[in-house]
Image (cartoon, rainbow, N blue to C red):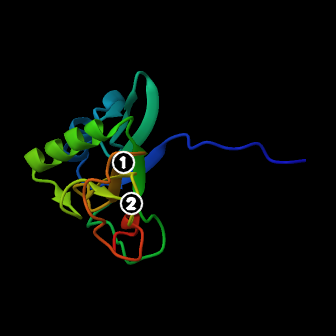
Amino acid sequence: MSTPALQTGHIGLNVTDLARSTAFYRRVFGFEVLGEQTDGDRSFAFLGHDGALQVTLWQQSSGTFPTGRPGLHHLSFQAPDIETVHRAEATLRELGGELVYDGVVPHGEGASSGGVFFTDPDGIRLEIYAPSGADTAPAPTQGAPTCGFF
């Protein structure tokens, strides 16, 4: 008997400052707040689109995301088109966000898919990409996928 294909339900992230992270994810991703608790020692926010939960933020950590330790590498979000990716890039620049590469770049040499690669306020590596339209820029990393954050 085969196991049915599973889909990602939602992504839960530990953050150090719930208000800051909620504002960041709302601006960059256009998420709505579906639910939240901001007082007391159990602070969290449920974020999504059209009532569908996509990201939960939990104020349960300190410091920054340790990219050199085992665990999460990065989170990738697919946009419907490259124009949406460029709008996210503009928002990130407006917010003073930390871009990993200079703007929208392809996933690799000769690839049409690609996006913008950046970190959130706690250093979590993120990607917003489109399946096509990013081939107007050179790949930033030769011989390796861009989403490797090399």
Q: Is residue 97 left or right of residue 149?
A: left
Q: Is residue 12 left or right of residue 25?
A: right
Q: Position of residue 41 (x, y in %)?
A: 32, 46
Residue located at (33% from left, 42% from top): 43
Q: In this view, does 15 lie above or below 19?
A: below
- Residue 142 visible? The answer is yes
* Residue that label 1 marks: 129
Residue located at (41% from left, 77% from top): 143
- Residue 60 visible? The answer is no
- Mark 2 residue type: His
Tell me whether the residue at label 2 lies in contact with that at label 1, contact meaning CB atoms closer than 8 angstroms.
yes
Q: Is residue 66 above or below residue 75?
A: below
Q: Is mark 1 on a helix, strand or loop?
A: strand
* Residue that label 2 marks: 107
**Quadrant placement of the C terminus:** bottom left
- Farthest residue, direction right: 1
